[in-house]
Amino acid sequence: MNWTKEQAYAKLQDIYTDRVMQDEKRRIFQQVYRHLHEHLSDLAVSSGLTEQAEKQLQFFKEYTFMPGDNLFQSMRFVFFLARGERKGDQAETEQHLARIYKALFQPAGLKNPYIPDSFWETPLGVACLVAEEGVEAVYPILDEIEEVEKV
């Protein structure tokens, strides 16, 4: 299909429902939460979080919302960019992308994140690709989705 920006954003709006975005936030939360506990164990403080902090984190996981300037807000930002519902300036977009990449893919000993190819096939990966390179970058992915939907 020969996509226009408007058609691509409309398709991404159909794909990125609130449910999909919430499920992706929960998936990412689980990864970061597990990583946090692994590092606490590395530092011999496996019970390093207070009971109140644990309760608060469970609340954030359940409702997929975390107040303040954080990873969830960065995910929300790139999802809205991917849906064409938000326009961000380049500096703000880069700041949100850097937070996502650092939180998910930057080991302690590396200066830059290592992003696996499989990430670009996830809902968050596609949204980041749109935020980083524009909606035109996902036309091939949208073509694949169209093919699957025809079958």
Image: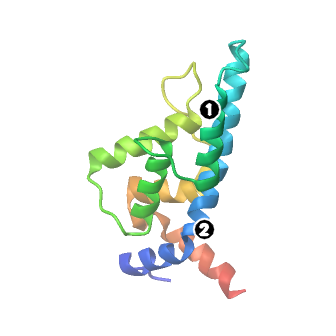
Which residue sits furthest bottom? 150
How many residues crowd mark 2 within 10 Å: few (<14), some (14–19), many (20+)?
A: few
Answer whether labels 2 and 1 touch (C-beta < 8 Å): no
Query: In the drawing, what numbered circle is on residue 52?
Result: 1
Q: Which residue is mark 2?
A: 19
Q: How many marks?
A: 2
Residues at marks 2 and 1, CA–CA distance in whole angstroms: 28 Å
User: Where's residue 66, x and y in %?
Assistant: 50, 46
First reached walking from the N terminus: tag 2 or tag 1? 2
Query: In the drawing, what numbered circle is on residue 42?
Result: none
Q: Amino acid at mark 1?
A: Gln
Is residue 117 visible in the rendered structure shown here? no
Quadrant of the image containing the C terminus = bottom right
As displayed, is residue 127 above or below residue 30?
Answer: below
Is residue 40 visible in the rendered structure shown here? yes
Say what secondary structure mark 1 lies in: helix
